[in-house]
Image (cartoon, rainbow, N blue to C red):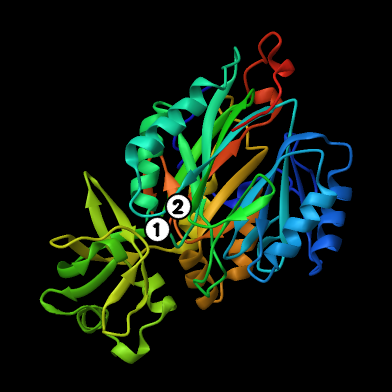
């Protein structure tokens, strides 16, 4: 009943399970508000949670929300449980993709325990400190018989430190699988923050260690294959994730030439549909381009370095890969109770540019997905881009039995 990479095949049209609006998840209560006033929104979410008494609440925040006002509203209106979360580049709710929903996920106390810590994300990252901090969290959070563990990480999406941070966290967590997403700020690429201890923090990473009596499976997929078009990074500023030259030419000029568009037409949509890939063993990961720099360089959302060999990617049919990647089953052949998803904003841009938002939302809804759009994803110790990463939780009937006394442990916070 362990965890694994769920890369199922199938179609949403063939699913017989109702969506979350028809049949709410048993283990995680999903509440959203479209109120633009922070106090009104939190009041609506608090009313929706009711007497659930969760062990934790995850809050995914639209870019437009005043974070100071939201902090005050949380302090006055959500005092009975710990609230964690981050700012987003979009939300995935019971209805699929949204931009203006304050989304709350209440994890029921009878199925989840949580420990948390806040990790500094400023450069340069103290790798040994991050490893030790995550290791201490594990050691101070005693395991319960018959339960499973996983870690969720939410990072400042503008820190430029995600690659080294997630690798260090994974080392400290050892065999505990790590999933998560980088906080966003719509498409503005402005300030991104994580929520911990009742306050929003920048230059920080939120680490949540979850223990559950539920069965779960990890999910990770993208929709690109490498082409024969190769690029070598011939000049870069690695600490800024900035590539100045590709193949000895100005980076934006060379990339535009390979893609076949004028430099003036380079945009987030072009980047999302024509990513560059880097090989890691037998697999390729996207190194997403963020924007064109004023000097003709290209800013990236993942680590980049001199001499790195890149290949231009070609997309497969995005709806088919979305549906196939989300079609996962438990060890008893059951469908997920809920899928917590972290979906790159560049994937969503491609979907919307192709006029497929409704179809993609239908697939997300059919597979019972909730979560947010990210500036990058964390998957089993690796920081990736233009990827869907998530965790499929199966219902109480599909997981292990709670161990004796396991529900007596209070939540632990560092």
Image coordinates of residue 300 in percent, x first then y, are 33, 67
Q: Judge left or right: residue 270 versus residue 396.
A: left
Look at the numbered disc 1 and give the secondary structure of its residue. Answer: loop
Q: Judge left or right: residue 63 versus residue 180.
A: right
The first of marks 1 and 2 along the sequence is 2
Residue 384 vertical position relative to residue 34 in the rendered view, above or below: above
Q: Quadrant of residue 339?
A: top right
Dot 1: few (<14), some (14–19), or many (≥20) neighbours within 10 Å?
Answer: many
Foreground residue among 216 and 247: 247
Foreground residue among 52 and 314: 52
Which residue was labeled with disc 1?
Answer: 385
Disc 1 to disc 2: CB gap under 8 Å: yes
Residue 87 vertical position relative to residue 2 in the rendered view, above or below: below
Q: Quadrant of residue 263?
A: bottom left
Look at the numbered disc 2 and give the secondary structure of its residue. Answer: strand
Dot 2: few (<14), some (14–19), or many (≥20) neighbours within 10 Å?
Answer: many
The residue lying at 86 percent from left, 56 percent from top is 44
Q: Could one spot residue 9 in this view of the protein?
A: no
Q: Judge left or right: residue 127 versus residue 251.
A: right
Q: Quadrant of residue 23?
A: top right
Image quarter (top left, top right, bottom left or bottom right) of the C terminus = top right
Residue 383 vertical position relative to residue 70 in the rendered view, above or below: above
Q: Could one spot residue 299 in this view of the protein?
A: yes
Image coordinates of residue 168 in percent, x first then y, are 36, 39
Image coordinates of residue 229 in percent, x first then y, are 18, 70
Foreground residue among 223 and 181: 181
Q: Residue most toward the left?
A: 248
Residue 211 vertical position relative to residue 89 in the rendered view, above or below: above
Image coordinates of residue 161 in percent, x first then y, are 37, 54
The residue lying at 46 percent from left, 55 percent from top is 321
- Mark identifier at residue 377: 2
């Amino acid at each position: 009943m362990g965890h694994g990479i769920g890369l199922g095949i199938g179609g949403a049209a063939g699913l017989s399970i109702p969506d979350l609006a028809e049949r709410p998840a048993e283990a995680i209560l999903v509440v959203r508000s479209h109120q633009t006033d922070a106090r009104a929104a939190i009041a609506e979410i608090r009313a929706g949670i009711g007497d659930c008494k969760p062990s934790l609440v995850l809050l995914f925040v639209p870019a437009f929300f005043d974070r100071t006002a939201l902090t005050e509203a949380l302090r006055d209106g959500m005092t009975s449980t710990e609230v964690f979360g981050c700012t987003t580049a979009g939300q995935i709710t019971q209805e699929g993709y949204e931009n203006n929903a304050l989304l709350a996920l209440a994890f029921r106390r009878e199925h989840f325990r949580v420990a948390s810590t806040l990790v500094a994300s400023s450069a340069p990252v103290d790798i040994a400190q991050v490893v030790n901090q995550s290791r201490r969290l594990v050691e101070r959070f005693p395991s319960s018989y018959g339960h499973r563990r996983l870690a969720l990480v939410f990072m400042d999406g503008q820190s430029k430190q995600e690659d080294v941070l997630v690798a260090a966290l994974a080392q400290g967590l050892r065999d505990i699988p790590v999933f998560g997403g980088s906080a966003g700020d719509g498409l503005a690429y402005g300030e991104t923050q994580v929520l911990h201890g009742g306050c929003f923090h920048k230059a920080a990473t939120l680490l949540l260690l979850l223990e559950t009596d539920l069965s779960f499976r990890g999910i990770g997929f993208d929709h690109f294959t490498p082409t024969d078009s190769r690029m070598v990074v011939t000049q870069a500023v690695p600490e800024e994730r900035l590539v100045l030259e590709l193949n000895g030419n100005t980076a934006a000029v060379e990339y535009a030439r390979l893609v076949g568009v004028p430099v003036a037409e380079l945009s987030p949509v072009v980047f999302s549909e024509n990513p560059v890939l880097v090989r890691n063993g037998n697999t390729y990961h996207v190194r997403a381009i963020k924007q064109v720099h004023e000097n003709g360089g290209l800013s990236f959302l993942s680590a980049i370095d001199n001499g790195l060999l890149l290949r231009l990617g070609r997309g497969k049919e995005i709806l088919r890969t979305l549906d196939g990647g989300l079609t996962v089953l438990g060890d008893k052949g059951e469908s997920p109770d809920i899928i917590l998803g972290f979906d790159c904003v560049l994937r969503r841009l491609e979907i919307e540019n192709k006029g497929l938002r409704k179809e993609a939302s239908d697939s997300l809804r059919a597979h019972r997905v909730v979560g947010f759009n990210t500036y990058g994803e964390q998957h089993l110790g690796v920081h990736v881009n233009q990827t869907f990463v998530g965790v499929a939780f199966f219902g109480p009937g599909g997981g292990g039995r709670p161990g004796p006394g396991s529900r007596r442990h209070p939540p632990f916070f560092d």
